[in-house]
Image (cartoon, grey):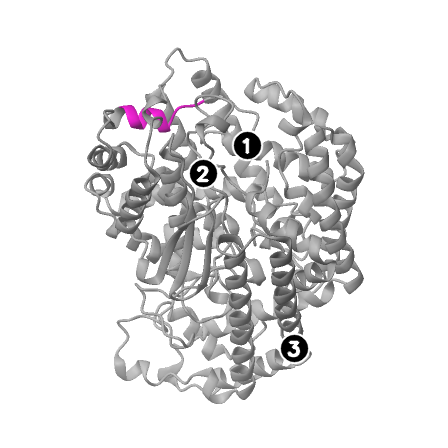
Amino acid sequence: MIDMIFRLSVKIMFAISVTISLLAFSVQPSHSFLFPDRDHRSASSTRSSVGIRNRHSHISLLQLGGFLFSTKSTSTGASASVSNKASSVCKGSKSNINLKMSAATDAAADTSTDTENNASTPESIVHKKQLLEDVSPSYTKLVTQLKSITQLKRTSAVLDYDRMVLMPQSDASSKQRGKQLSVLASIIHEKATDESIPSLIETSIADLEKLLSSQSQSEQQYEYKDERRILQLTKEAYEKKIRIPSELEARKAELSSAAYSSWVKAREAKDFDMFAPTLKDCFATAMEVATSIQTDDTDTGIDGTGEKKSLYTQMLDEFEMGMKGERIDEIFSQIESALKPLIQKVLTSQHKPSTNPLKGKFEISKQKEINEKIITTMGFHLDHGRIDQSVHPFTMSFGPADVRITSRFNEDEWFQGLAATIHEGGHAMYEQNIGDSDLDIDEHLSMGMHESQSLFWERHVGMSKEFCNWSTSIFKETFDDFTYDANDVYDAINAVEASPIRVEADELTYPLHVILRYKIERETVDGRMEVNDIPKHWNQQMKDVLNVTIENDALGCLQDVHWSALAIGYFPTYLIGSATAAQLAFYCKKDNPDMYQQIEQGEFGQIKSWLTDKVHRHGRRYESLDALLEDQLGEPLNPKYFIDYLTNKYTELY
């Protein structure tokens, strides 16, 4: 797979200067790379007639400049001050910062579950809460500094968005932009690693302890959960930055640049052996980085059991925090066991849905009009965002009132553009409803959770019968020669065909592509597989599970850019997102029995509000995706819902 946005951004940036890469790395989380989940391709570029269907756009989680998405909540009424913000009380977000609370305060905390931020709390009581900012100059200074860093990251992101969408593409323009980004990265790095941060954190903790111990009986309902979580996240981020030796960071940045170039050449030559030595270095260096982050500090390095996280879990934690490798094994094994026989049944079925309803001549300007109408009807606010066209679809946010999505269109096929727009719109609606504190607590929870939001809208809404009933009429009104009915469209967008390429796979076979990559990278990290054996294992598994013969390495283990970027542990988030989307859809329908009738009428308000209440507004107040789901839905991630969704849907279709 070619990492679409990676080609546009990382290739240029790393080529300009290893220094730029190092500085950028030092101020952004490790999951700042951009990897496609699906590629929206034209009919002429696909390997088969069904290659144009079911394209999820790339993951589109741009964290260029170290920041992706933090937009104000239009449904929760979040204020600029996180302490005043009406946030949820998160049972799964227990702070690891050791605040010494009195027995009386502990008892109050146990019995005041939702009073701190509950809108029904009497006004006379709410006004008694004393803000930590009012009594702790250190906390005020720390938060001010963190917000400043956020705004600098957003500024860097604006420059990157301009580079990918509007800026001239000459080498001279790219070099000039690289210099601008380098200066910003230097400033951000200096602020993010300021030596005063640890003392500000410790003093803030002490001030919070004093505030808690001085509360009167009527005030003991206030647990200051957000403040504790902010301090925890800040402490973890800072300690992670300083644990990685500068020499190792420099080596990683230099290797990333060289590895990308090596991967491109090997892929063009269709020769894994050309890339193998570099890939060995990529795995070794990524493992070295993960090892440096591991620690005996119970705040950040311990897995909650008194033991260090496994090396692969540590690597996975950079993208899906709080999710152990053993937990992934449990989830993926259930999905794999259930889907293998279902896929074989579907692939050998005599019924082959036609994809002709997707093809024809569709004026791009009219497609844009339809896409804008649909995504804004779903809930994407143009007064807080915009829709542009780019070579490859992505989503980026610059702050509370500016979340942008891009899509791409093909006049010979209409679904790729619509699927991309809905997918990116799902990411964007998440960000338009996260709080506006300008702090890490109001960022997306994890890559898997973000992907679940795009897939919820793309799959469980946009690929449903009811959506086809509603949207097909729009296409008929717009395109005079569009004569297909909703059933024809539904069959076409849900057709299944085994493909060797992950980004061209349909939603039924796609999970096996992810599981294959997960098993390979985990076994390699655990020392159970040698890098040189990857092609052989890859090709055999593709034959065994999908009956696909891999003709060359470019169509096999060289198709993805992730490992060359040292993003080991990233692949599982795609399938975590798929499973989470299905579980959310189940509970959304349970709470809103008219969900699909509403979709058929083009009414999406209750659906979006439900997602905002259950997911969007919580940001990173939970320590993991499992914790959020358990608190909001009553159970952690359960692959049963994903399995049932696919089984019911494709048994009916085939």
Image quarter (top left, top right, bottom left or bottom right) of the N terminus: top right
Residue annotated with mark 1? 502
Q: Is residue 37 left or right of residue 483?
A: right
Residue annotated with mark 2? 56
Q: Is residue 406 left or right of residue 327?
A: left
Dividing the picture into quadrants, the one containing residue 428 is bottom left
Residue annotated with mark 3? 198
Is the residue under label 3 in contact with that under label 2 (CB below 8 Å)?
Answer: no
Query: Would residue 495 be counted in the magenta stretch?
Result: yes
Q: CA distance from mark 1 to mark 2?
A: 11 Å
Q: Give the percent coordinates (x, y) of residue 375.
A: 31, 48
Q: CA distance from mark 2 to mark 3?
A: 42 Å
Secondary structure mainly formed by the magenta segment:
helix
Is the residue under label 2 in contact with that under label 1 (CB below 8 Å)?
Answer: no
Question: Magenta residues?
Answer: 488-496
Dot 1 alpha-carbon crowd within 10 angstroms: few under 14, some 14 to 19, many 20 or more: many
Residue positioned 67% across, 42% down in the render = 563
**Amino acid type for the residue under numbered disc 1:** Arg
**Amino acid type for the residue under numbered disc 3:** Pro
Q: Is residue 245 left or right of residue 502?
A: right
Q: Give the percent coordinates (x, y) of residue 481.
A: 24, 27
Decide: is 258 above or below 141: above
Dividing the picture into quadrants, the one containing residue 551 is top right
Q: Give the percent coordinates (x, y) of residue 240.
A: 67, 64
